[in-house]
Amino acid sequence: MSRRIPSPTVDVALLVARVAIGVVFIAHGWQKLHTNGLTATGHAFKAMGVPAPTLSAYYATFVELGGGILLILGLLTPIAGALLFLDMVGAFLTVHVDKGLFVDKGGYELVLTLAAVTLALAAVGAGRISVDGLFGRRTPANAA
């Protein structure tokens, strides 16, 4: 027997997920831009074997910073979620996959979690408590 979760509960859950994940992405984007700097981030990416390290540093920095902001606002959520998901797939494949699961060993547990949540947000949208919801953008989460 299937039980439908009341729509306000879904909207609040999506808001909490968007804000939590958005904060993490903003922090990582800000770290790449301001704390480390784009040049140092590019050098670090090169040392880790990331392809096109300068371009990858710019992509990761601005997608994480901008995408995190968009997630918190719930603005263009499917696009932001998809771009952030691709960012995490890249991080998984180029840096973390061979280091095991646990983050303290450079593993992929955080990357995997962020990828899963951003993919889910890209698929279901922001919900009604969002800028997308305010403008009536229809997604599976706010279609009811």
Image (cartoon, rainbow, N blue to C red):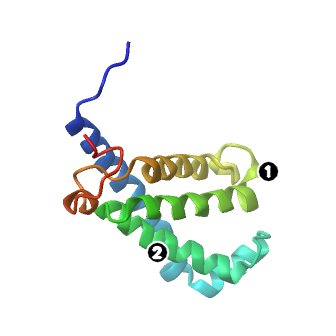
Badge 1 marks a residue whose secondary structure is: helix
Label 2 – label 1 distance at C-alpha: 26 Å
Please name the amino acid that badge 2 sits on: Trp
Residue 115 location, x and y as percent? 56, 51
- 11 vs 93, nearest the viewer: 11
Q: Is residue 92 left or right of residue 110?
A: right
Location of the C terminus by quadrant is top left
Q: Residue furthest bottom?
A: 39
Mark 2 lies on a secondary structure that is helix
Rendered location of residue 18, percent (x, y): 36, 53
Q: Amino acid at mark 1?
A: Asp
For residue 94, above or below residue 29 = above
Q: Vertically, is 3 above or below 140? A: above
Answer with mark 2 or mark 1, whichever residue precedes in sequence.
2
Up-down: is 7 above or below 83?
above
Residue at image point 22% right, 63% down: 135
Give the labeled residue for mark 2.
30
Where residue 69 appears, x then y in whole percent?
A: 36, 68
